[in-house]
Image (cartoon, rainbow, N blue to C red):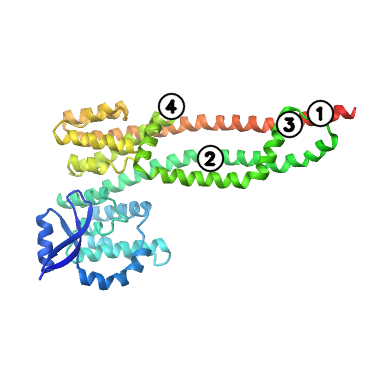
Amino acid sequence: MSITWHYSALTVEGQLQRGQAQGPDEAHVVAYLRRSGLTPVRVTAQSERGRLAGLQISFTLRRTGLRRSQVADITRELALMLGAGLDLDRALRFLIETLPETGRAGLRARTVLIELRDAMRNGGSFATALATRSDSFTPLYINLVKAGEAGGALGEALDRLATLMERERKLTTSIQSALIYPAILVVASIGSVVLLLTGVLPQFVPLFAEAGAQLPFLTRCVIAAGDFLTRWGLGLLLGCLAAMFMLRALLAQPAFRLRFDQTLLRLPVVGALSRNIMAARLTRTLGTLLQNGVSLLSALKISEDVIGNRAGAGAVAAAALVAREGGGLSRPLESTGLFPPRAIHLMRLGEETAQLGPLCLRAAELHEDAVRVDLQRLVALLVPAITVVMGAVVAGIVSALLLAMLGLNDLAH
């Protein structure tokens, strides 16, 4: 009798695929999946799935994946232990024992590592075990581990993965750190202006009204702005928050996100920064995958997801189609005009010398340095611009008050 089975399986690209299959028993379904080019991860009968659903739902809703920083730290420690001669099971056991048993982050990491260890003890590979926790480990991670296991160099693969994640974290941190000061400056400046208009200015309005004099135009404008903020300030704040949520919802739409990313790349200073970030992420990911034995087409497919720009991801997808036909990688990427010439040149050189992986990593280093330089330039432009604009606004408010006070002084004399 044929039974409906629910399965989770790993594709050749390292993606976790879920679906249903018909078969008399689990062995038939596993054989069918392997004939289809899939690596079975979990196979559950329809009736068993129904019985377990009520027990699993509460756990599934609560379970969350590891943070990227946790994954990077775990990967580095595993790479060090494997490099020192420990086998993977002992390395995982050591990590589990050293992780704290208190705190949400520590418990979550222990749970994930225990699941990985148990899956391997049940006969699965490390890559297959990682695929069961796709909420913590990306397709890039799984593919690199799979290639490392196939080549007998899992320690080297984990070392490259740790380096990749540390470089990505360093790049992200440098971007965030560079923008913190301008953001604080903007918030402080806006707060100062609002305080002047809604807190200081109203103290002088009764004095101006008692004098009954014609106020200067600038003073009337400033008083009107203060009245508007006092009356509609809360509504304006709620409107800004609603606009932010609406923008976030629109960015979740593929068509709008594509147009937004295309516009971003055309901006004068931000565009150059975005191009260098795209190039750094693409070449770092591509080089790491190729150095670990992953095929070019699989590496390009994975790289689409890490670029962080829909326009750039589309360019990589189009280049992958050309590469599939034997047309190379550098020329289709160059034709899009989205990537810096230096990255294209090094890719072309790598194709010509059969050193695409190492030269992609070299290009990544160059463009990561370029990102840091671009960030310094951006901050050097933003900080004076914000200071000048907000200084002019504050000076305008103070000038409006002084003009009115001088007018009252003239009337008194």
State whether residue 99 appears in this view.
no
Disc 4 or 1, which lies upstream in sequence?
4
How far apart are the two marked residues, 2 and 3, measured between alpha carbons? 29 Å
**Residue at (47% x, 41% y) in the render:** 177
Q: Are marks 3 and 1 in contact (CB under 8 Å)?
A: no
Q: Residue furthest right?
A: 413
Q: Are marks 2 and 1 in contact (CB under 8 Å)?
A: no
Type of the residue with mark 4 = Pro
Q: Nearer the viewer, mark 2 or mark 1?
A: 1
How far apart are the two marked residues, 4 and 1, measured between alpha carbons? 44 Å
Disc 4 or 2, which lies upstream in sequence?
2
Circle 2: is it few (<14), some (14-19), or many (20+) Cα within 10 Å?
Answer: some
Q: Which mark is residue 183?
A: 2
Q: For numbered disc 2, what is the local secondary structure?
A: helix
Left or right of residue 331: residue 69: right
Q: What residue does disc 1 label?
A: 406
